[in-house]
Amino acid sequence: MEETRGRAYPSRQSESTSSHDGGARSDVIGHVNHGSNVRGLKKRGHGSRSWIKIYQDGNSKTVTLDKATIMRCCSLPSRDLRLLDPMFIYPSTILGREKAIVVSLEQIRCIITADEVFLMNSLDGSVGQYKSELCNRLQKEKSDDLPFELRALELALELTCSSLDAQVKELEMEMYPVLDELTSSVSTLNLERVRRFKGHLLALTQRVQKVRDEIEHLMDDDGDMAEMCLTEKKRRLDTYPLSDLFLQTHLSGSGTVISKSAPASPERTLSGAEVLQRAFSNIGNSSKYGSLAGSSDNEEKIGPLEMLLEAYFIVIDNTLNNLLSLKEYIDDTEDFINIKLGNIQNRLIQFELLLTAATLLATVFAAVTAVFGMNFETTVFDHPSGFHWVLVVTGIGCAFVYFSFLFYFRNKKVLPA
């Protein structure tokens, strides 16, 4: 019996072990299935989009790329790509990154590198105009002094400023006749039209102001402008001696590199590409830390970009001034209408005052006639024309009191002379 019990324990233990293993397997399978579901969700979240790829020689083609490919190709964080997402509404932005320039100006949303432009494909006319114009310029003007990225940026600024300026001129042509008509005829229809145009003016002013502020911000920061000189950074990356920044003290199969200026630390594995990337980043960001802020070389490098930004800053500033002038014209028209309505209201009040005084005196005259119309005995009725004399004297008295009121109100300047 004891032997039987002794034999039974291992079986129960094996059953419990097998059940435990089965539960562990089911948990593992559940985790695996859950992980696969999560990966499926992530894959569905990273949808591919259509891009127009424009090369330096002016050729272009339409490609379909997902978010990860763009991030890897242009070395951009995901938050920069959200600025280009047409599903979200972001203000106009120009960002200089390590290997690319992120441009989001109105409907033109693109990523500019030193060798190519990734233009987000859209049915908007400005996208097709940017593509065709950039390809034509790259094919015809091959001897331009500006580098490739600045030519692409210049076209984006040119089309954006031209589009905004055209919208401002169209709004001016529509608003000025309506405002002039409103000054001559204040009606509900004209007021509603001016209200709608004023809302459009406010939205357009905010868009123009954002583009102007973005260009001004870039002009005030030499470091941001230096980041946008991609061709110069690429040339320095190709020709800059790494021995000036790094000392290869130990180079084995794993590729360990130690910096000259870095303190002693545990060895890290860095590939040759990562070493180039580090050196490139140090060169590109040196202006931000002041190492190249006052050098003539840095000023010469950002000179063409600064002149380019200044030119379009003047254009967009002029557009903003036109909008502000239009807003001031609207404010002047509103002030004129308020003064006109106030004058009409004052005239109505004056008329009401005269009418009230006349009503008061008419009431007095009616009260006198009512009293003498009573059936009572008095000596006035002994004469046939006695009641007529009462009416004449009462009327003359009321008229005298009424003109006395007018003289008093004019003397107090309540009524116009």
Image (spheres, rainbow, N blue to C red):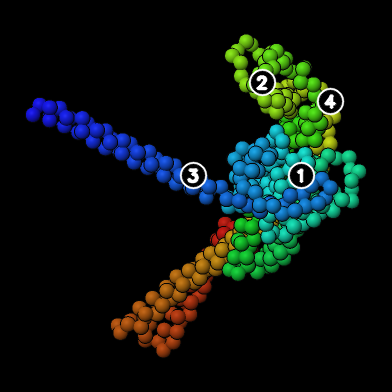
Label 2, on which residue?
Answer: 253
Determine crowd level at label 1: few under 14, some 14-19, many 20+ residues with C-alpha closer than 10 A: many
Quarter of the figure with residue 214: top right
Determine crowd level at label 4: few under 14, some 14-19, many 20+ residues with C-alpha closer than 10 A: few
Label 3, on which residue?
Answer: 39
Query: Residue visible at 12% across and 30% down?
Result: 4
The CA distance from mark 4 to mark 3 is 49 Å
Foreground mark, 4 or 3?
A: 3
Q: Is residue 315 above or below residue 255?
A: below
Closer to us: 334 or 53: 53
Quarter of the figure with residue 152: top right
Closer to us: 405 or 313: 313
Determine crowd level at label 2: few under 14, some 14-19, many 20+ residues with C-alpha closer than 10 A: few
Foreground mark, 3 or 2?
A: 2
Amino acid, disc 1: Glu
Badge 1 or badge 2: first in the primary sequence: 1
x and y, in percent, of residue 167 in the image:
72, 58
Label 1, on which residue?
Answer: 116
Badge 2 or badge 4: first in the primary sequence: 2
Residue 6 is left or right of residue 273, and the answer is: left
Amino acid, disc 4: Asp
The CA distance from mark 1 to mark 4 is 26 Å
Residue 297 disc label: 4
Residue 391 is left or right of residue 18, and the answer is: right
Residue 108: in sight, yes or no?
no
x and y, in percent, of residue 383 in the image:
40, 87
Badge 3 or badge 2: first in the primary sequence: 3
